[in-house]
Image (cartoon, rainbow, N blue to C red):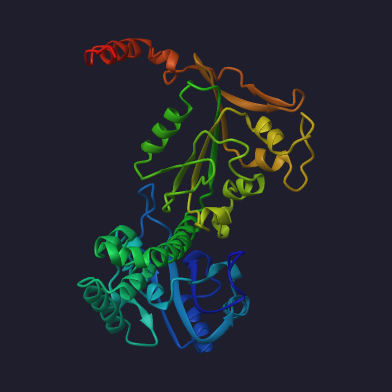
Amino acid sequence: MTGSAPRKTRAMMYEQQLCHLPASVDEMYRRIEALAPKRYAGIVHDHDITDAGRPAADHLHVMMEFANPRSVRSVAKSLGDKAERLEAWKAGTENGFSYLCHRTDGARSKYQYDPSLVRANFDYPAALASIESRVSKARSHSNIKILLDDLLEGRIDREGLISQLSGSEYARAKRQIEDVYARRLQVSAAEWRAKMRDEGRRVQTIWIFGPAGTGKSSLAKQYAQSKGEPFFVSGSTRDVFQGYAGQHTIILDELRPSSIPYADLLRVTDPYAIEHEVMAPARYADKAIAADLIIVTTPYNPMEFYCEQVRGATVGRPNDDIDGFGQLERRLSLVVEMQQKEICLSEFRVELGTYWPADGSSRPNPYSSFARGSSGSGDSAHLYEALLDSGTVTAD
């Protein structure tokens, strides 16, 4: 169970690799039936593919719906497994049952399992067909309530919903849309965390620092683009996560110590964030973070950044107490320093109390304004002449 999951819930998803099941698949279903859920349905996913293009380990998914809220820990104990293998399904039961065959909007790119393979205590194929039929009808007209339900269930995206509304309808429903969309991000993040756990992956953080004009943002964006997926670049310093929409790569561009509280920075960069829900701070509209790569670009090295945030901190290695510098240092997978002419790997030197270039790591910097020769003086001269030649000045 995730750290922020409720103690009791009516809807929960059990997920475990077959090689780690506490008993046989048949025995697991017997244990589930003994819990007397109102409805349950399960399937073995044996055709899933990882992001790296390799077959994922075969694993069992079982969606359970109870008439009354049940303790996640109690259910886990009855199954003979750990509580973290159960997740309270915030999107609702229909989404959970649809996900078993990858029929949710966020999972349609995955292998589509045959509903006849699902083992359930109700007519699962008929129920799934009914859900999909209702979705199809809902999309044929602009019924805002139904569309909001579809947005939450992941059967339509935010832009698709807005495109079906008139201007006045959107104006009336804007707040509702944003609230439901924020919840949808939570649901998508939960599905993503489950996938990350199956693949044994962790969150990586790259810290790139250096003066202005050294190409920090260019390097960060080039690396993000190389992953072949959408990525998010932070916005204003007052609302860093404005516009975040569940992208798995986040660039915190030109980050300043005043941009984000230190405790929130630690939460976002936690390598084990996939084990629990991570939310952007409240002033950022409580958006669920679903990133496996965080890239920070900033003029400050990590120690300088920390000392600026924690005024009065001694320059040197502070104690690794709660929210000490050691907490941030341990979260950084890679620290890179960029200067006008070179790039190098940077390592924290305890005896110096700061970051220092690693021996033999220096490389030419092709991203800087120096390397690109983009001083801007030539463009300024042309613009100046064009400005003066734009018309004849008439004396007053």
Give the camera-side residue of 11 and 360.
11
Looking at the rendered image, the quarter that the C terminus falls into is top left
Q: With 360 as the anchor, is 13 left or right in this view?
A: left
Q: With 337 as the anchor, is 116 left or right in this view?
A: left
Q: Residue at x 38, y 47 (%)?
A: 52
Query: Could you tell me residue 55's position as x and y percent?
Result: 37, 54
Q: Is residue 71 above or below residue 175?
A: below
Q: With 393 as the anchor, is 80 left or right in this view?
A: right
Give the camera-side residue of 190 and 16.
190
Give the camera-side residue of 64 and 219.
219
Give the camera-side residue of 24 and 137.
137
Q: Can residue 144 be seen in this view?
A: yes
Q: In this view, does 45 lie above or below 97?
A: above
Query: Could you tell me residue 44's position as x and y percent?
Result: 39, 70
Which residue ends up furthest to the left in the rendered image?
Answer: 140
Q: Is residue 238 above or below residue 127?
A: above
Looking at the rendered image, the quarter that the N terminus falls into is bottom right
